[in-house]
Image: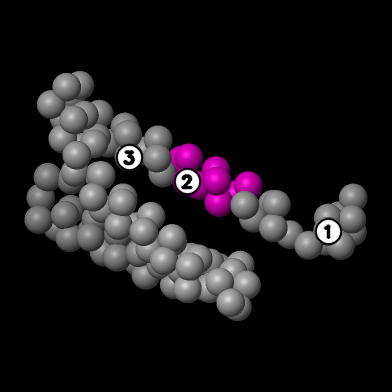
Amino acid sequence: MSSFWGFWLSMVILTFGELTLVPTATKYVADLAPADLRGRYMSIYWLGWGLARTLSPIIGGFLNDNLAPRAIWVGGLLIGLTSALGLFLLNRLSRPQSNLLKAA
């Protein structure tokens, strides 16, 4: 997008995505953790967010300077697709065994 309204639309989509992802992922991690280890699980989860925010500009700058400015977008697409595949597989693996047996 090259106009103000294109940027605005992109930010609205990004905001809705974040408002959907963060509470859902936080609840998933909290439900996954045993009660006595919940703080540790949550700290590792948020450490991942912090590392991503730290490394993203470095990786983006490297891609921009050494490959091409479009490489940032291709890299983001690959990370997004990998994340979507990971969530799909996590959903398939976390189903109770009884549901899997009924489906067969």
Which one is earlier in the sequence, the residue at label 1 or at label 2?
A: 2
The residue labelled by disc 3 is: 76
Q: CA distance from mark 2 to mark 3?
A: 10 Å
The kind of secondary structure element at disc 1 is helix
Question: Which circle marks residue 21 in the picture?
Answer: none
Q: Residues under labels 1 and 3: Cα distance?
A: 34 Å
The residue at which mark 1 appears reads as: 97
Q: Residue furthest bottom?
A: 35
Can the viewer see residue 69 in this picture? no
Q: Is residue 32 magenta?
A: no
Amino acid bearing label 1: Gln
Residue bearing the label numbered 2: 83
Using residue 96 as the reference point, say whether residue 28 is left or right of it: left
- In percent of width and height, residue 22 lies at 41, 67
Membership of 88 in magenta stretch: yes
In the image: residue 29, left or right of residue 72: right
Q: What range is drawn magenta here?
A: 81-89
Identify the amino acid type marked 3: Gly
